[in-house]
Image (spheres, coloured by chain):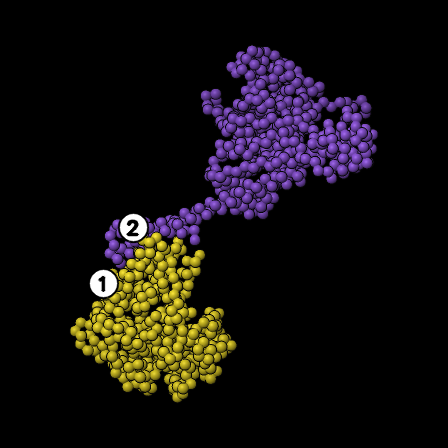
Chain colours: A purple, B yellow
Amino acid sequence: MASQQREISVSEFFTKNRHLLGFDSPTKALLTTIKEAVDNSLDACEEAGILPDLEVAIEPAGGDRFRVVVTDNGPGILKGQIPKIFGKLLYGSKFHRLRQSRGQQGIGISAAGMYGQLTTGKPIVIESRTSKRRPAHRYELVIDTRKNEPVVKKDTTVDWSAAHGTRVEIELEGVYRGGRHGVETYLRQTVLANPHVEIAFRPPGTTEADEPVLFQRASKVLPVEAHEIQPHPYGVEIGLLLRMLKETRATTLKSFFQTEFSRVGPTLARRIAEGSGLTSRTSPRRVSPERAELLLAVIRKSRIPAPPMDCLSPIGEERLLESLEEQVAAEYYDAVTRSPAVYRGNPFQVEVGLAYGGELGADDLATVCRFANRVPLLYQQGACALTKAVLQTNWRSYGTQQSRGALPSGPLLLMVHIASVWVPFTSESKESVAGYDEIIKELKLALQHVGRKLGAHLKRAAKARDSERKRQYIEKYIPHIGIALREILDLSERQEERVVRTLTGTLERSRKM
Amino acid sequence: MAKKKKAAKRVATQSTRSSTGTTPRKTRAKKATSKKKAARDAPRKAAVKKGNKKRSPRAGKGTQPPVPGAWKVIQRISTEAESVRKKILAKRTPTMQFPVRSLSNVVYRPTSGFFEMKGRTKERTLTVGTVKTFAQTLRMMAFSKELVESDDIATKREAYYVSKNWQECRFNEQPESDTVMEDVEALFGVNREQLGFIPEEKGGDVAGELVVVDHDRETGEELRIDCTRFGSGAYSIPISVEQLRFETKARFILAIETAGMFQRLVKHAYWRSANCILVSLGGVPTRACRRFIRRLADAKKLPVYVFVDGDPYGYSNIYRTLKVGSGNAAHMNEFFCVPQARFLGVTPQDIEEYDLPTHPLKDVDIKRAKDALKNDPFVRHHKAWQKALQLQIKMGVRVEQQALAKHGLNYVIDEYLPRKMANTGAFLP
């Protein structure tokens, strides 16, 4: 028995549990591969302060195989890092930090590569250049699934026209689909939530000569860089607190609270310690679990400012509006970015964009575009807190129709975005957001805010239509008053015209009554 | 919203006014107009001349309708139009004052014997909601002026068709144009004939001990029409009755609601045995019919007895309108009423007394009876009528004139009418 027990490599685990990471169907596998590559490119560009220009191409490679090529104008990757980033699962800069970013576990792109390798046997091809002065490197990588180690098959330099950037090529088995869950929808929504991004898309069946589908940049302003933060006291649970107390380098409770948490100053730190019957100078390591519970109780009773905003980088109301106006042909646009809030000590921020009217389908249900840290969520709409918040909002009171338990109907598009240092996804495939009360509440407040304004707008529009109708009505009948008066009083045409003109003016002014 | 309601109301008043309903109107209108075309100008001219000569139209109160001269009608129309125009040019919203045409604006004085207008007016201000009716009213006035100036006439239905030239201003249904016409009539306090409009309804039928003296339209020759000599037919009351003279030795006039009962009495020459004049009202009596009975009764000092169905419609619509006029055209009631009329039957008491078969009252009947009790100044003045209506509501049944046939077809002639006529003092007021 014992002889059969051995370490399971992460790669091996993945091959058996690919559905956990979003590779459970050929359609989804293709989408997830593109998604991971695009996420990586965008994160890299933004970190380097470069406006991202991406090209995404899907080329048929015979049978049900596709070659996915994602090229960016990012900073490029240092030669030595390339195999680790793309060929080793759980390698990344993101997992250990409390900071808003697209990917979280560093599992994405290497998993995509592994999927490709498993289904086609082809290696991942990576080309990258970091500066004009250096050559572009080209790697062909395979992953040793047993050891979770990259194996470089080929290492060459190639000619690159651009000064810097990265090109990832993965061949995989998949199904290309359009529609709600398709690649094109994903790219369109990506640009919607990232108005500073421009993506040229070459769907399968198009050649180099064809014009790519272009999702245009609406704004040249890069998102504000998100800073790393400490956890906020409100979000800490007893298990985490005990672990932190044990692992901290601080020697007193006071300094423990001050250094390990955000928004705790010396006064508050002392008050927490003393409120639990301890002192500021108690050693964290000597706090018993019972005392730790007391500490938590005191923390919950204290007034602590919200965590710092700078760990979050929302899209922002202005950018949202610019983006909606660029991407959606509607009549009315609105956006709101809520102030940051906290769930379980994790700061998060909710944003809602709304477009109404125009070319949006008037008879359909509303379109809800969900985003987590600027990444579109296409699957599991029903299970997602973002959808639930939309459903729980009473849209009927805002002048739109809504059947019981359904999305509102009408020419309505909603963008719902949650930005957080740690978005609580319901699964590792990152398809839907868990419904924490704090999150639902913030979402609903944001939705109600744009809803109220939409209601006011619709009322105004209806009023304008009404008064236009009245104006036409008046204009229809006033000439007859002119005719009748001319006939009775033998007026000249000029006199008749003067009557009609004066009366029209008088009535238009008095129309509000 | 408000417009819709108004339209519905109009239709309602229309249907209560004409007992024959709307469907047969078209054929009737055709007949009426062709008849009138032949006999068009003479009576109108006569009427106008008379008015001019008299100068004071109200002098013959109760005996002559006011007949303002054509020039005066034109002047009134022009004055009204000028005041509208002045207000428009002064950048004020024009208004017109119309007398309220409903029972709420009439008062019943037994001394004068008819519904008199109380003088309440409604101001129609030109607003978004009223601009269509306002325009239609003015166009109707313009059309009326044209008619009077050219000494022409139009039936109510013709006026409705003329409006079809007014594009968006046209009337969709005749009740709409009738209402506007009646508004204009009331606005100027004149009879519609003075505005050039004539009704197309039949005036009513007459048979019995009466000679009507009329004139040939072309030769002016005197015509003596003997109403005993129509056999099984009857003399038709013309639209305008002012020129008629009467010769009779009859003892009374009997006004009958239904043509069926009229036919029976004619067929068996009841008028001869009772020495009376029979008039068929045909539902709610037309103005011409009311005026005819009034002139005849006044001239020959005859009592008028009314014999209608025993239901709230017969009481408060047919009988009351004949006797004291309507709330709708109250400005003309003075001339189109028969204050000497008395109610012969069928009364609610008759149902028991003569053991008559009945029908249950419909909701609309009960509503009409209650409405009369509450709002009709005539009913409210006469305790006897209140009692009769209350009794009817309590009994919950109505009875038709022809129900008397239960006791034999000629029971009405042999029994009912003689018994009734033996005690005219007991007739309802």
**Does residue A295 appear anywhere in the picture?**
yes
State the residue lying farthest toward the left.
B219
Which residue is rendered at x = 24% and y = 52% of the image?
Answer: A492
Residue B314: % across, % down: 41, 75
Residue B149: % across, % down: 23, 63
Q: Is residue A304 left or right of residue A486?
A: right
Q: Is the residue marked by circle 2 packed among few (<14), some (14-19), or many (20+) residues within 10 Å?
A: some
Marks 1 & 2 on one chain: no
The part of the image, by quadrant, that contains residue B259 is: bottom left
The amino acid sitting under disc 2 is Arg
Between the C-alphas of marks 1 and 2, the distance is: 26 Å
Of residues A336 and A21, the one nearer the viewer is: A336
Which residue is rendered at x = 29% and y = 50% of the image?
Answer: A498
Q: Which of marks 1 and 2 is in front?
A: 2
The part of the image, by quadrant, that contains residue A262 is: top right
Of residues B79 and B150, the one nearer the viewer is: B79
Residue holding disc 2: A498
Of residues B69 and A278, the one nearer the viewer is: A278
Do the CB atoms of the residues marked 1 and 2 lie less than 8 Å apart? no
Residue holding disc 1: B149
Tell me the quarter of the image containing the N terminus of chain A. top right
What is the chain identity of the residue bearing mark 1?
A: B
Q: What numbered label is drawn on residue A403?
A: none
What is the chain identity of the residue bearing mark 2?
A: A
Q: Is residue A269 left or right of residue A128?
A: right
Which residue is rendered at x = 37% and y = 73% of the image?
Answer: B116
State the residue lying farthest toward the bottom.
B422
Q: Is A111 situated above or below B140?
A: above
Residue A251: % across, % down: 79, 26
